[in-house]
Image (spheres, grey):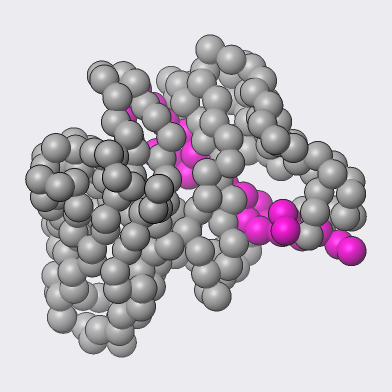
Amino acid sequence: GESVGLHLPTLSVQEGDNSIINCAYSNSASDYFIWYKQESGKGPQFIIDIRSNMDKRQGQRVTVLLNKTVKHLSLQIAATQPGDSAVYFCAENIGGTYKYIFGTGTRLKVLA
Amino acid sequence: KAGVTQTPRYLIKTRGQQVTLSCSPISGHRSVSWYQQTPGQGLQFLFEYFSETQRNKGNFPGRFSGRQFSNSRSEMNVSTLELGDSALYLCASALAGGPQVVNEQFFGPGTRLTVL
């Protein structure tokens, strides 16, 4: 598969540990955010979303935290597994359109 | 429910040619967006269609165009191809709600375009 980014920041985590991936978004007017996971050769896969009226949302093994004061988003993955190895993107949406701005991405490597 | 499908998956063209890519959204989804993904620029928004109308547009030249059909399927066209157009072109669909209501957006596997 192709590389989605040659110079992405990389987070290496031991299998079973928790992972925290961070994202700084650009626009204080952004009101909806999505985290995507992209594996080599595939399109981005929806993981979890959060609206700006919330500061935390939990899914299965994942939690998204939103700090609007500093325009920061984080994705926490509990008990990281080898299958979690991928590139993770945050996407921000402004004003109820379907025009998303994507972050540069973080490569997560899970070490056995 | 079937996911977003894109055809073809791989395409090789030469400079100056044109290309048409196709996207079939998830059944019931009326919003279709297109993105370009490159190692240097990351994921960049091209345009979004809803009910056969372009609702939003990114910052790409007029060589990039699209359309949507009544069954919500969408096509994207790039004319006069340049080497820099080599990229993964991704389509995403969403169950568009009312004004100011944005729902989850789901991506297809992409079309890998190589321009020689």
Task: Name the one closer to the observer, A85 or A61.
Answer: A61
| Residue at image coords 31%, 19% | B100
Number of numbered discs visible in the structure rendering: 0
Task: Name the one closer to the observer, B27 or A80.
Answer: B27
Residue A70 visible in image: no
In this view, B98 is above or below B16: above
Q: What stretch of residues is rendered in magenta? A: A83-112
On whether residue A92 falls in the magenta region, the answer is: yes
Residue B39 visible in image: yes
In this view, B5 is above or below B46: below
| Spot occupied by residue A108 in the image (x, y as percentages of width and height) | 72, 55
Q: Which quadrant would the N terminus of chain A be assigned to in this image?
A: bottom right
Q: To which quarter of the image does residue A7 belong?
A: bottom right
| Spot occupied by residue A83 in the image (x, y as percentages of width and height) | 72, 58
| Residue at image coords 17%, 64% | B77
Task: Name the one closer to the observer, A47 or B86.
Answer: A47
Which residue sits furthest front? B1
